[in-house]
Amino acid sequence: PTYDSHFFFQKVDKDWNKSIPEFKQEITSFNYDKKNDILLFGDATGSIKYIRKKKKNECLELDSKFDHKVLYIGTHDHFIIAIGEDNVKEETISNYFQKGSSVRPKFEYTVKVFNASTMQLFNKFLLLQVPSIEEVGINGCAFHLNKMAVVLNTDNKDLKSHVIIFPNILSSSVTPQLIEIHKTCDLVSVCFANYIQSISLFIASTKSLWRLDQDKLIPEKVHVFHSQKNMIPNCMSVSSDLKKSSSNFSVYGVPNTQFLSLALDKNLLLYNTSTAQMIEVPYYQPIAEKTKLMCSFFKQYVAIVTTEYNRQSLSIFYLSESTKYKAHEEHLPKNKQIEGLIPLPEKLIVLMKESPSSPTAFPKRSLLILEEKNLKTKLSILNMKLKYNEALNMALSVDQSDMYTEEITEILRRSGDSFFRESDYDNAIDRYLADGLPIQGVYVEASYVIRKFLDSQLYYPLSKYLYLLHERNRADADHTKLLLNCYIRDLQHGNKNEKERADQLLDRFVNQKRPAVEQEKIQLIAIDALRAEGFRSRALGIAYCEPQQDELIIRIETEDYPFHSDKSNYRRALAHLESLSDIKAARKLMAQYGSVFMYQLPKETTNVMIRLCVDDYVPYRQDIKKRNYPIREVVQDDSFETVRDGEDHGFSIFGSLRGVFEREELLKRREETSVLPEEQVFVGSPSEQNKLEALQPEAFIKAFIGNDYWLMVFLECVVFSGRDRLSLEPIVYNTLLEIYLKFYAQLSTKEQTSLVPSSHLEEYSLMLSSLSQENYPSPVVNSNANSTGMLFVPSTKLIPQQEVFMRFISEYNYAIRPPSVQLGHMSLHERIMTILSLHHPIKKIPLYDVEYAMVMVQTSKFYEGELLLYEKLNLYHNIIEYYKSKKDYKAVVRTVEDKGHNDPDMWMQVLSYLVEEMKNDAPEEQNKKAEESLRSMLRSIKSRENIPPLMVIQILSRNESIKIGMIKDFLKDKLEQTMSVTSNCLAEINNTQKETREAAQEVYKLRTTAHVFQKKKCSAEKCGKHLDLPVVHFMCDHSYHQRCLPNEEECPKCAKSNREAVNHYQQQLKNGQDLEKFHTLFNKDAFRASAHFFGLGVFEKTQQHQQ
């Protein structure tokens, strides 16, 4: 699209142009009344013509005219003020006759005030009188309320240095006030303006600017003009639209500020009436050399009419720190001239005069209206002309500039791009970031700037931009990563100076003070970026020097460093873990990285895990100089080296040329972030908090995959350390039992494979040789040992390398002591049985998973444990089957005697088994053992009576080899016992029958015979007095006062026994309905069970059943 180079649209009001009359004389004054929409003209004949647009643009003339030409026409409120030349009247000569002069005045300058609504003369007063018509003009006229100030353009020495002030132009009697400014000054302009909460009069002369305050007669010089040749009449104007900000762009947009604008010969002056600051702005160079005829100020523009070679031009400049850009320029042909300028808030009216084509014709006049374009169009024009500063000033100078954020952003982008093309990256970054703008949240999108720098491979300017972006809190995580990558790239591929610079910038960025959350976020990103590019030592340095980064320290040590034969990186990581004062964090990290440590440092890791779980963990914090902390000793030389993978800097954590952190600094920072007090720095007694917060060891079991021996050592210390076993989970006991059984299976099968890795055999042997029990003994497998052999065999034989090994132990202090001396001397069989015997003291349930243990002992063929578990699970039949398979008849009988109290089936099963084992073809020894067990079995049956004799005879009769003599004693004893029971039962039956007959007779007697009550005293325990009416008698021969009875339905003395009898009877009936008990007894002894339940009335119909 094509853009107009001007800020104004040119319009021609045809209706007004048609109404403008043909003036025979020159138009000497021209103005416009906006309130009443009246166009005013004054000519050299003294007439004032006007065009009122509301009345069909008719051209009319005021009735009151001047005798000579009109010098000035102005508007103020609802009045029109005109100044013109008149002939002197006789009655006014004396008032204005100059003292000391004999020349009588002939002409006078009069001020006429017209009502703008009626166009009638409102007031008239004299300005001055002169003896002859001179070249007198009005250089300036200003109004404030009803006050008017005038300065003249004249050669009269007594008038050109004075300002004439009329206090009230609407008063009937107007007395002017003549104030001398300076004797050598030619006054050219005047205006009223605000100054320190009051209205002052400012007067411009050819040499300086003056200020006349209210109620003062002596003006004060404000500013001196330098090197000014020709002054333009009426060159000063006050504008409340011109405003100045304190931003870097010098935008004139600060509210409540008023400016005086002065158009001088060589430059423009802008005077801030609030701060008394004068700003000089130069003209555009061609304009500065031309002759200036007139000027006019409106809004933020100044319109200047210049002439050169008899040709006029109209130039409009935008008022800013520099006026080198023209907002509008109009070159007139030689036959056209400008006769007047009328500034309005939204437009400029220009009165044009066109020379006549013939000498007899009159000049033709027209109006040219310049209307300002909208802001977006003006900003587009400035952007196309690369005037970015002016565009930004203009956008920010308007009210509600926050509505033009998109336009301002586009200006910033274009301006930054222009600096970018010129390789001025600092200014470009400033524009992209929009530093100094009074509007918040306006800046160029970061993605655009980043892409622009990346496309040009300008990494250092990009890093500077990203750093400033972080300072302004506009950066996100991606920006942080990109910034760090820029620094890292310079460290990798830059020259010496670039590396030093990147090193300094990286340190400054990472160590800058920020809020804690933001700082931690940036540090994590920095560590990840450095690790990804191989700067592990620098990443480790950042992690070491800040709290809450313990996991990263361990991760870097264990994952990033190459393998060293001395495993120094793993030792550093483990040492850091056990130095943590936060025991929860230490346990969490050990659970996470335990498998890594176990693979590299099994013994040391086991030591730390044991201390974490057996309530005696204390952070191990030695002096940092004695610890194996990786501190880099930097030697400054001419070469700059970067710590990378593959280089020999395994112990280095800082990659800075200056060393960045000293040992003391690191120690101080780590101690400041520690929770432990000073007295707990070294190993000591465990804290109560650690005891209460001991972690369950099952979290560490997964770390021992492939390390059964160390897992056994760990679990033994946990289980047998004396801590509360009830808090341990069953998986702990299950795992320890599984390892025991695994070793037991190896021993039982006489395998030659060691129970521990071969790499540890020497160490275990050395530990085994210690007699002080300070080191945990090692398992040594003897191929000749049986299943109950000792797993830990103490030895007194010293190994030649013991001295070296003990020095190793002393250095690292990772010795593992057994939980008890007795445990070291227990056999593997005893340890397994100990685990299987553990149970809850109150609930009496095993602490391990019984079913899981059963599978393990069966798989490992550990029979004693299997029998123990059968007993815990009440699987007595399985125990009997086990002894049957072993032909252990005594154990079978002992088991049934101990466990078969309420199980007749078990007795019959064992009896049948023993009968079957006595065979004719069986070995004699076997038959002898079976016969002894059978006799013992019969004695137990006889004493317990858990199998009916008939059933015993039937079972024994199955084996023909069993003689009657074996059962003779059993049958004899049973018959004698039966006869004794029978006789006792008969006696009891007779007694019962007798009692029944007596009771029946008594009942019959009570029913048929009268009963005489002969009691004379009350039977109540608390009474005992003689009976008197009313009396209550009971059939049990007890008598009571009626008042002594709580209940007349039963005798108090016999009630308890009666209730017991009734309850017994009801219980008998209830027992008679218990069918389960009947079936149980019936299976043991059918006859006795039937007889017993007949007695309980099992076949009688109860009253409830009948109902």
Image (spheres, helix red, strand yellow):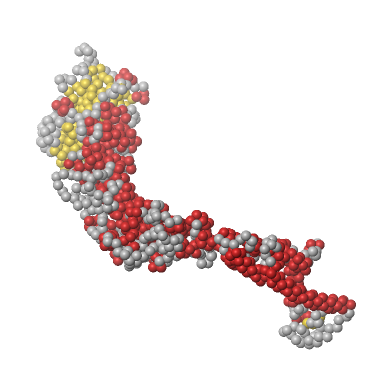
Residue at the extreme right: 1008
Q: Compare residues 81 and 533 and report the one nearer the observer.
A: 533
Asked which quadrant contains residue 711, the reply is bottom left
Name the residue rendered at 29%, 30% in the picture.
379
State the image coordinates of residue 1101 (x, y, percent, origin top left). 80, 64
Asked which quadrant contains residue 998, the reply is bottom right
Locate the C terminus by quadrant.
Answer: bottom right
Asked which quadrant contains residue 502, the reply is top left
Q: Say whether residue 604 is visible.
A: no
State the image coordinates of residue 426 (x, y, percent, origin top left). 22, 37
Q: From the viewer's perspective, is residue 740 above or below residue 354?
A: below
Locate the N terminus by quadrant.
Answer: top left
Q: Compare residues 918 and 664 and report the one nearer the observer.
A: 918
Name the residue rendered at 50%, 57% in the picture.
861
Q: Compare residues 904 and 808 and report the one nearer the observer.
A: 904
Name the residue rendered at 67%, 65% in the picture.
962
Q: From the viewer's perspective, is residue 378 above or below residue 920?
A: above
Residue 601 appears left or right of 457: right
